[in-house]
């Protein structure tokens, strides 16, 4: 069997699936964007997956209508990816199945290159002008109707992809539910998978945060907060505003905040600053900054060790994609204090395998974190249940990867001679 995996930044969500299919004896190629225009196309392998690149031949139109820019960018990528696939076809390589992430547009025209090949689309999130992330936080209102129109226009390529896919795969029930009702019967919910052998409790874990930073171990009053970027979508502002009172109640607490200064989701911070600095400035005069550590992004091994020493891991999110850090923290046996938003409620049951508080209830967040730090023995059962949840529902090798492989084999059989 021949498999084409499409992801702008491969491997992305297919880090484990691509090599797994190689081990199944499949001929696997991955199509991704070349690092820079003008560079030779990729011709390398990653764990047995042959990498091939595409390059855009033009940029977006100057002074185009702003609602068209996102769609035009996706069409440019789609054309470039189709050209690269046409070259593979001329060389005699024909996939039995195409699997990919349609979010950047590359999969839009592949049915014209290989019209009879089934396509499995990784469906991460379908944006809507209301009812999900947009307008959820009244502090950052959705704006007037033109902003809603921009979101509507942005959905065009996503809707086209839903028409062309044979089937979809989505990590969580909530994420699948964001797609139109007519597409949902074709979506299978299978998570990317958590390596619970790596992300596991470790009583001997130690973390040294810099030459002058604190040395941390299990049992220390450590609060952790992790996101790719520190921004409102992931509740960074809610944590920062709660920290002064948490410090007052827990004078020995050390808060470790992991994440970058950029923006992954939503609007940028006010001009001249970042969301990280914007909300730090808001409460800096009330904080003991010697007990707040911003690490930036960390190596994965250090990040896991930090979760292993965590006394309380705060995970907040808008109604949006569930981050891996929530599940990895649970797998490490951390006590997660999460926002009572739909993505988190799908995996955490309040008082059973974690604690949930209203996204906007600062007093409840303070109380939950304070209790976690002051009464750690009270929550041992929840920590154990948290890890059990991830092992039983999200384990990479025993649960998710076998289900993913089974789905690919089923779809490939649709095109078998």
Image (spheres, rainbow, N blue to C red):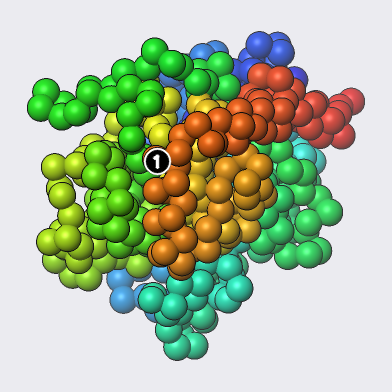
Residue drawn where x is 46% and y is 68% of the image? 360
Which part of the image, by quadrant, shows the C terminus? top right
**Rendered image quadrant of residue 297:** top left
- Rendering coords of residue 337 (x, y %): 49, 47
- Rendering coords of residue 62 (x, y %): 30, 71
Residue drawn where x is 53% and y is 28% of the image? 333
- Rendering coords of residue 144 (x, y %): 45, 88
For this rendering, which residue is in front, 303 or 366? Answer: 366
Residue neighbourhood size for the residue with mark 1, other residues' Cα within 10 Å, grouped as few (<14), some (14–19), many (≥20) = some
Which part of the image, by quadrant, shows the N terminus? top right
- Whether residue 165 is visible, yes or no, is yes
- Is 285 drawn above or below residue 114 in the view shown? below
Residue 252 shown left or right of residue 400 in the figure: left
Residue furthest to the bottom in view is 144
Q: Callout 1: helix, strand or loop?
A: helix
Residue 358 shown left or right of residue 353 in the figure: left
- Is 386 drawn above or below residue 21 in the view shown? below
Residue drawn where x is 30% and y is 46% of the image? 250
- Rendering coords of residue 383 (x, y %): 56, 32
Residue drawn where x is 20% and y is 66% of the image? 282
**Rendered image quadrant of residue 257:** top left
For this rendering, which residue is in front, 377 or 303? Answer: 377
Q: What residue is pinned by disc 1?
A: 374
Residue furthest to the right in view is 417
């Amino acid at each position: 069997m021949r498999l084409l995996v499409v992801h702008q930044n491969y491997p992305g969500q297919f880090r484990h699936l691509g090599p797994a299919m190689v081990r199944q004896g499949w001929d696997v190629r991955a199509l991704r964007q070349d690092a820079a225009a003008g560079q030779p196309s990729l011709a390398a392998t990653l764990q047995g997956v042959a990498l091939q690149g595409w390059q855009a031949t033009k940029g977006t139109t100057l002074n185009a209508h702003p609602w068209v820019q996102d769609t035009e960018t996706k069409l440019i990528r789609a054309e470039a990816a189709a050209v690269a696939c046409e070259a593979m076809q001329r060389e005699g390589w024909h996939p039995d199945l195409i699997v990919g992430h349609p979010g950047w547009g590359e999969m839009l025209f592949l049915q014209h290159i290989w019209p009879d090949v089934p396509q499995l689309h990784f469906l991460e999130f379908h944006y809507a002008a209301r009812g999900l992330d947009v307008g959820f936080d009244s502090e950052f209102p959705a704006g007037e109707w033109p902003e809603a129109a921009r979101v509507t226009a942005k959905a065009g390529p996503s809707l086209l992809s839903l028409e062309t896919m044979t089937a979809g795969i989505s990590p969580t029930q909530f994420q699948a539910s964001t797609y139109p009702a007519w597409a949902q019967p074709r979506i299978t919910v299978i998570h990317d998978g958590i390596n619970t052998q790596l992300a596991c409790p470790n009583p001997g874990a130690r973390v040294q945060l810099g030459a002058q930073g604190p040395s941390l171990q299990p049992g220390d009053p450590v609060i952790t907060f992790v996101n790719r970027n520190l921004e409102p979508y992931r509740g960074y502002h809610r944590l920062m505003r709660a920290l002064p009172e948490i410090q007052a109640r827990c004078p020995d607490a050390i808060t470790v905040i992991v994440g970058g200064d950029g923006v992954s989701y939503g609007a940028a911070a006010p001009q001249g600053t970042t969301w990280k600095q914007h909300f730090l400035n808001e409460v800096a005069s009330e904080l003991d900054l010697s007990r707040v550590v911003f690490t930036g992004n960390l190596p994965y091994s250090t990040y896991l060790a930090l979760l292993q020493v965590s006394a309380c891991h705060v995970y907040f999110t808008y109604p949006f994609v569930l981050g891996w850090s929530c599940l990895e923290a649970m797998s490490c046996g951390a006590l997660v204090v999460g926002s009572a938003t739909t993505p988190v409620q799908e995996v955490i049951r309040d008082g059973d395998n974690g604690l949930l508080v209203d996204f906007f209830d600062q007093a409840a967040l303070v109380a939950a974190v304070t209790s976690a730090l002051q009464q750690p023995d009270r929550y041992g059962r929840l920590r154990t249940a948290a890890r059990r949840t991830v092992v039983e529902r999200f384990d990479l090798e025993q649960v998710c990867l076998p289900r993913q492989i089974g789905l690919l084999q089923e779809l490939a059989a649709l095109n078998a001679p």
